[in-house]
């Protein structure tokens, strides 16, 4: 019995040590890209437009940093969405508009690895207690996963 207790305590201790790391990216999907930051977002943008989504803007944070004499690894944000779909979400809870349109971030880490990150739609739906739009949540989740795969994989 003492071995069982020790195993449970050991397992619990490991989980506690890992918990802060799990929370740091809570709700974020981070996919490793096979392309550089600009190519990753170019691919995502092209796929989004081909899917009939509207691209609102693209922000190059590294370029912005350079404009004020600072340096930043490649970091670009793409803001995109569907006014029709977004309006459905916002009509359920107007505060969701702070998270819409959707965003994806392409960025390079300290090791030179490029990542594409986005917030899971389920997090937004949960944050604003939107339970009356399950089809939209499913549609957004599927579209983001498909677009992200297209952007990051050959």
Image (cartoon, rainbow, N blue to C red):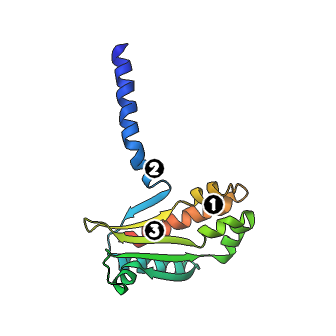
First reached walking from the N terminus: tag 2 or tag 1: 2
Q: Is residue 2 left or right of residue 145?
A: left
Residue at the spot of label 1: 137
Which residue is at 37% across, 33% downward? 13
Task: Relative to 100, say whether 131 is above or below.
Answer: above
Which residue is at 61% across, 64% downward? 139
Mark 1–mark 3 distance (CA, rounded to whole Å): 16 Å
Residue at the spot of label 3: 148
x, y (%) of residue 34? Answer: 32, 70
Residue 91 in which image quadrant: bottom right
Residue 93 in which image quadrant: bottom right
Q: Quadrant of the N terminus?
A: top left
x, y (%) of residue 85? Answer: 67, 71
Q: Is residue 79 left or right of residue 110?
A: right
Residue 105 in which image quadrant: bottom left
Q: Nearer the viewer, mark 3 or mark 2?
A: 2
Q: Which residue occupies the foreground of this view, 61 or 101?
A: 61
x, y (%) of residue 41? Answer: 42, 77
Q: Which residue occupies the foreground of this view, 113 or 97?
A: 97
Q: Secondary structure at mark 2?
A: helix
Question: For the view shown, which residue lies furthest in the front direction?
Answer: 68
Question: For the view shown, which residue lies furthest in the top direction?
Answer: 1
x, y (%) of residue 9? Answer: 38, 26
Q: Secondary structure at mark 1?
A: helix
Residue at the spot of label 2: 23
Q: Which residue occupies the foreground of this view, 84 or 76?
A: 76
First reached walking from the N terminus: tag 1 or tag 3: 1
First reached walking from the N terminus: tag 3 or tag 2: 2
Give the class, few, some or many, for how many residues have Cα within 10 Å of label 2's Cα (few <14, many ≥20).
few
């Amino acid at each position: 019995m003492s071995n069982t207790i020790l195993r449970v305590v050991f397992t619990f201790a490991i989980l506690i040590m890992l918990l802060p790391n799990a929370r740091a990216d809570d709700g974020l999907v981070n996919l490793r890209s096979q392309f550089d930051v600009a190519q990753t977002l170019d691919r995502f943008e092209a796929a989004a437009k081909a899917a009939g989504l509207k691209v609102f803007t693209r922000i190059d944070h590294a370029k912005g940093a350079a404009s004020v004499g600072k340096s930043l690894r490649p970091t670009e944000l793409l803001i995109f969405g569907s006014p029709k779909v977004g309006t459905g979400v916002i009509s359920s809870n107007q505060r969701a508009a702070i998270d819409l349109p959707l965003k994806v971030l392409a960025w390079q880490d300290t090791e030179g690895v490029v990542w594409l990150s986005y917030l899971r739609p389920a997090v937004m739906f949960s944050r604003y207690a939107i339970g009356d739009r399950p089809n939209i949540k499913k549609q957004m989740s599927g579209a983001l996963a498909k677009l992200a795969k297209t952007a990051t994989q050959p």
